[in-house]
């Protein structure tokens, strides 16, 4: 992906993110073909082109996986309906976006859906259930990038990430609608999860508007 700069519009961000998606798609296709061959990494790098390493180093995720693991017990308590303690919300290790109400609500829905998928959803609904989890996961990841540290120093980028998050949520909701048709026995449960996702889409819409209302960054800032 190209390196962003302050002059980028929403369109520039969206185009760059689509290019990044295409790079990732091509990489995983090549990985599937060549991963077991001797020198597979070199073959993949040759097919991807000279900018391969730079394209995949543009976004530094840091140690988000470790942070996520540290937060899982709290997320499970939320899924059980318990309130988070003030001590948790004041923890200096909590990343800014994790305090955002939309992110917190969406993560709670994700953990709840994990429980539904693992313990309740019948075998014939597992494929669609996994698709729901995939779309919610992408929505969370893009929302995290869109919120970042809450400064909105790249408002157009925040909007672009939030729009991708919204798109993923809409796909999750559409998949749950299909599950509702195929498994009316679980209607109450599925509608509850669906309601949480609808509320998250409303919050995302507000987030997009908030980002668009931010003043553009000053040149050279």
Image (cartoon, rainbow, N blue to C red):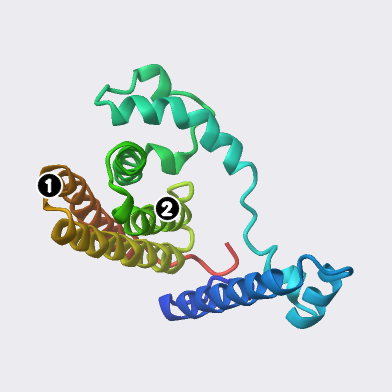
Which of marks 2 and 1 precedes in the sequence? 2
Q: Residues within 10 Å of mark 1 (few under 14, many from 20)?
A: few
Residue 30 visible here: yes
Instruction: Provide the residue designation for mark 2.
Output: 137
Quadrant the N terminus occupies = bottom right
Residue 171 in the image: above or below residue 64: below
Residue 21 in the image: above or below residue 63: below
Label pair 1/2, CB-CB below 8 angstroms: no
Image location (x, y in percent) of residue 72: 46, 31
Residue 1 visible here: no
Name the quadrant containing residue 56. Answer: bottom right
Image side of residue 158 versus residue 193, left or right = right
Instruction: Provide the residue designation for mark 1.
Output: 185
Image side of residue 195 versus residue 35, left or right = left
Tell me which residue sits at (51%, 73%) in the image: 17
Tell me which residue sits at (41%, 17%) in the image: 87
Tell me which residue sits at (27%, 22%) in the image: 82
Comparing 39 with 101, the one in front is 39
Image side of residue 21 versus residue 32, left or right = left
């Amino acid at each position: 992906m190209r390196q962003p700069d302050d002059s980028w519009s929403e369109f520039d961000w969206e185009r760059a993110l689509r290019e990044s998606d295409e790079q990732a798609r091509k990489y995983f296709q090549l990985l599937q073909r060549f991963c077991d061959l001797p020198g597979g990494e070199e073959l993949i790098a040759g097919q991807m082109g000279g900018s391969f390493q730079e394209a995949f180093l543009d976004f530094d995720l840091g140690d988000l996986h470790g942070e996520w693991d540290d937060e899982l017990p709290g997320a499970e308590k939320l899924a059980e309906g318990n309130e988070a303690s003030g001590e948790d919300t004041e923890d200096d290790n909590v990343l800014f976006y994790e305090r955002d109400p939309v992110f917190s609500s969406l993560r709670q829905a994700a953990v709840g859906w994990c429980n539904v998928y693992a313990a309740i959803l019948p075998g014939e609904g597992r494929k669609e259930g996994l698709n729901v989890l995939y779309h919610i996961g992408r929505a969370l990841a893009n929302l995290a990038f869109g919120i970042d540290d809450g400064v909105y120093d790249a408002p157009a980028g925040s909007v672009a990430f939030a729009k991708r998050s919204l798109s993923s949520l809409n796909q999750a909701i559409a998949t749950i609608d299909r599950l509702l048709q195929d498994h009316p026995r679980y209607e109450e449960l599925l509608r509850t999860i669906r309601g949480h996702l609808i509320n998250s889409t409303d919050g995302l819409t507000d987030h997009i508007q908030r980002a668009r209302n931010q003043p553009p960054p000053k040149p050279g800032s």
